[in-house]
Image (cartoon, rainbow, N blue to C red):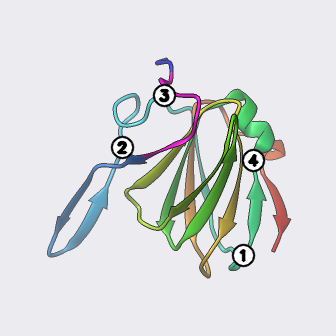
Amino acid sequence: ERNLISKVSYLKKIPEFKDSRGCLSFFENGKHLPFNIRSISLIDNLDENSIFSHYQYSKTSDIAVIPLRGKINVFTKNKENLTFLLSKPNDGLIIPKLNQFCIKTCSENPVILLVSSEPYSNATLTLLES
């Protein structure tokens, strides 16, 4: 597993191909993300202004947050507080280990992909309010 260069969250463009039929965004294990993929989670059927916390998860794993549909704000905290607005499927946010973060939906029924360097556990995702 590669070490992350930075301990601060940062944006990373996911490769995409566009033509008259639509757009294909993709990533490969160990190539487009700075970690090896151990789990993938899909969050959907959310109301606008729902807030999710992933604090426990972020202590042990690197995370990529990718909005497949809709707009989301992601708030991260490590040495500094940062806010990221994500609205395209090729917008990836890399959140290194030990960063606290939460996700707030900014549109109705967004679909969010979480990619992690560690296996998923039900105890790691918390809906704070809706």
Cα gap from disc 4 to disc 1, whole angstroms: 16 Å
Relative image position of residue 30 (x, y in whole percent): 40, 28
Give the residue at x 69% y 74%: 46
Cα gap from disc 1 to disc 3, whole angstroms: 30 Å
Of residues 128 and 5, the one drawn nearer to the viewer in this rendering: 5
Which label sits on residue 39? none
Write down the region rendered in magenta.
Answer: 4-11
Cα gap from disc 4 to disc 3, whole angstroms: 18 Å
State left or right for residue 29 relative to residue 126.
left
Relative image position of residue 105 (x, y in whole percent): 65, 70
Residue bearing mark 1: 49
Give the residue at x 68% y 79%: 48
Residue bearing mark 2: 27
Residue 2 higher or lower than 97, as above or below: above
Cα gap from disc 2 to disc 3, whole angstroms: 12 Å
Give the mark toward the camera: 1 or 3.
1
Label 2 sits on a secondary structure element that is loop
The three-letter code of the residue at mark 4 reads: His
Residue 27 higher or lower than 67, as above or below: above
Give the residue at x 75% y 47%: 54
Sequence-first tag of 2 and 1: 2
The three-letter code of the residue at mark 2 reads: Phe
Sequence-first tag of 4 and 1: 1
Residue bearing mark 3: 35
State left or right for residue 121 relative to residue 89.
right
Residue bearing mark 4: 54
Q: Residues within 10 Å of mark 4 (few under 14, many from 20)?
A: some
The three-letter code of the residue at mark 1 reads: Asn
The three-letter code of the residue at mark 3 reads: Phe
